[in-house]
Image (cartoon, helix red, strand yellow):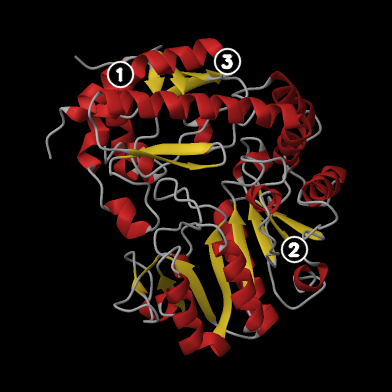
Amino acid sequence: MSDRNDDLFAAARAVTPGGVNSPVRAYGSVGGTPRFLASASGARVTDAAGTEYIDLVASWGPALLGHAHPEVVAAVQEAATRGLSFGAPTEGEVELAGVIADRVRFGDVRPVERVRLVSTGTEATMTAIRLARGATGRDLLVKFAGHYHGHSDGLLAAAGSGVATLALPGSAGVPAPIAAQTLVIDYNDPDALAAVFAEHGDRIAAVIVEASSANMGVVAPVPGFNKLIADTVHEHGALMILDEVLTGFRVHPAGFWALQAAAGEDYQPDIFTFGKVVGGGMPLAALGGRAEVMDLLAPVGPVYQAGTLSGNPLSVAAGLATLRLATPEVYETIDAASTRLVAALESALADAGVTHAVAKAGNLFNPSFRASAPRNYAEAQAQDVFRYAPFFHSMREQGVALPPSVFEAWFLTAAHGDEELSRIEEALPAASRAAAGAQS
C-alpha cells in the first residue's frame, strides 16, 4: 500500500531525472522509496506522510545547531523583509567574510586573510583551482581517489593505471582533455604523492584534498599526511587547496585544520574552501586564503570569477547567525554526543557478530563493514556493502533517519539531546542484527 512518499516519488520521476535533484537522494544504494521531507525542527524531521524521524543527516552537515533554529530563522525572515537579492554589495557580506577570516585561526596563525563568497561548494572548489592555476601559471591538478570536491568537469576524473598516469573521464559529458589535466592518486599514500611530483612536479598547480575525507565514508588523514602535502607542494612551487566544505566549522570552531593544529600538526594551506555550515542551511560557500593569492581574483587580479547571487543577503544572514551561535559549548555538546553514539554503535555491531570498524574524524563518524577502518578509497570499497541496506531500513522503521549510503558520514547537531540519543541507541541492536543476517 503506497503512502504520500510513494505518490510523490512517482510524480517526481515524471518531471525530474530519477525523481531527485541530487543523486544520493534516490536511495539507489539502499533501495526503497525516498522520504520526501515536509518539515524539520531541532534533531527531528517529518516526511510527507507525517512520520517523524530522529535525523542523522542534518541536511548533509549544515544543521549544526539543529534544524530551523529560531534565531537563524528569525535572521533570515528579517533579511527577507529588506529584499531577496540585490546583485550589489551589502554590509552583511563584509561581516560574514570577517567572521570567517577571524574564526580560522590557531594561536597567532591566521591563514585566511581574504574571503570570496560564492553560492555552492562546487563553485568554491572550481574557483580555488582556477585561482591556483592563475597563481602558478601551471595546468595540472592532483586529487585523491574517493575525494569529492563537487561536480565540475576536472574533478570528476577517474584514476589511470599508475600513480602518475593522466586521468580519464569519470562521468559522461566530461571531455578527455579536461580529465587529463587531473592526476588521481591514492589517499594517505606518501609514496604516491612523491611519485606524482617526481614525474610532473614542475607542471602541477595544486593538490586539492578534503581536510578529512567524508565522501567515501569517513576516512581520516593519517597523522602527518596533510602536513606532508603542504610541505611537498611548497617545495615544488605549487599550492595546497584544503577543502573544508564539509568539515569547516563542523568539527571545530575553526575547522579541521585547527583541530589538527591543536593536535600538533603544523601546516598552512594556501586556499581553503568552505560550505555547508558557513551558510547555515542556505546556499552559500566561500574560499579564502592569503592576501597575495586571493587578490589575484577579479576585479583586483586577472583570475575571473563572478556570480549574480554570490553573497545573497538571506544566505549571509543565515550564515552569520549560525556562526555567531556556534560557540565552543556547541562543539562540546556535539563531540560528547558523537563519542556516546560511536560507543553504542560499536557495541551493537559487536554484539550482533558483525565485522565492523567505526571510522571517525572529529565528531564525524560512520560504520564500515570491514575489520579495520579504511585508509583509502580501495579499502573503503572493500567492505560488506550489502549489510548497510537492511541496517538502514531497520533504523528507519524504528524512527531514525540515516544517510542513504554506506559511503556517507553521520551528522549530529547541538539539538540532539538525551531523548534523541537514547532513541538512536535503542534502535541500534535490531539494525545490527538485520545487518548480520544480510546476504550478499
Q: Name the residue that disc number 3 marks.
A: 417
**In the rendered view, would you say 118 is above or below 425?**
below
The residue under the point 82% across, 60% down is: 113
The residue under the point 35% across, 35% down is: 404
Three-letter amino acid code at disc 2? Gly
Task: Give percent across and percent down for residue 320.
Answer: 77, 37
Q: What's the CA distance linking mark 3 and mark 2?
A: 36 Å
Q: Earlier in the sequence, mark 2 or mark 1?
A: 2
The residue under the point 41% across, 75% down is: 179
User: Under tag 3, what secondary structure?
Assistant: loop
Q: Name the residue that disc number 1 marks.
A: 429
User: Which residue is at the front of the view, 256 or 206?
Assistant: 256
User: Which residue is at the front of the view, 325 or 191?
Assistant: 191
Q: Name the residue that disc number 2 marks.
A: 289
10 Å crowding of disc 3: few (<14), some (14-19), many (20+): some
**In the rendered view, would you say 197 is above or below 243?**
below
Q: Is residue 41 left or right of 48 when viewed as pictured?
A: right
Q: What's the CA distance linking mark 2 and mark 1?
A: 46 Å
Is residue 251 visible in the rendered image? The answer is yes
